[in-house]
Amino acid sequence: MSFCENIWDSDQGETINIQGGTIENIMHSGDADYVKTVCRLQKDSRIQSVVVMIVDEHTLIHCSDGKRITSRDLKEGMTVDAWISKAMTKSIPPQARAYRIIVKSNPCGTAVTDGRVAGVDLHNGFLYTGIPGKPESQIRFVVTENTPILDRQGSRIRLRDLKQGDRVRVEHADFMTASIPPQTTAFTIKKY
């Protein structure tokens, strides 16, 4: 479970601490990277929020073992703790400067899962595989705009083209959240 809480840091002023956030998307642009992160705004909240962290050369980024890394080492699906500015834009999702990011999960490897589509959530960009109505048998895949979805012939299709019961092969991050259903980022989806 991830959550954010307000803390005071004398170096940066008032900050928000994101604990256990999941990187959903990364956009590289000029001198800054925009890291879209899903987290819970309160410790006991069941509501997920999205914050875009603005990462630049002043952002300290390292693994949980202390090794320094760069924003180019961040990958979709990684779990992170972060300290961001409380001053956020009023955009949806809001954007805030990131002061420090700690990667809690190992850098992404790749795994493959074959299964049947249990459901598709177009609003949130999720693909569920497993048995419909049984979350304990399912995996929730985060599908981003960068995730290629292919039909049997290898032609690109959209998430909405996948239907319950379709057989799919999903190439994804080799780690998942400890939730029910577990969640991970899909790198490639192919119907077969």
Image (cartoon, grey):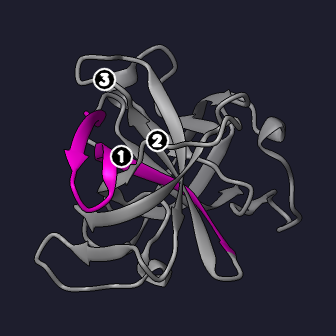
Query: How far apart, in angstroms, are the residues tagged by discs 3 and 1?
Result: 12 Å
Q: Nearer the viewer, residue 54 or 115?
A: 54
Tags 2 and 1 in contact by the CB under 8 Å rule? Answer: yes
Q: Nearer the viewer, residue 141 or 103?
A: 103
The residue that disc 1 covers is 21
Q: Nearer the viewer, residue 156 or 38?
A: 38
User: Which mark lies nearer to you, 2 or 3?
Assistant: 3
Residue 176 makes an appearance in the image: no
Q: Main secondary structure of the magenta part?
A: strand
User: Which mark lies nearer to you, 3 or 1?
Assistant: 3
| Span colored in magenta | 1-28
The residue that disc 2 covers is 38
Residue 12 inside the magenta-drawn segment = yes
The residue that disc 3 covers is 42
Amino acid marked by disc 2:
Val
Label annotation for residue 164: none
Within 10 Å of disc 3 (Cα), the crowding (few <14, some 14-19, many 20+) is some
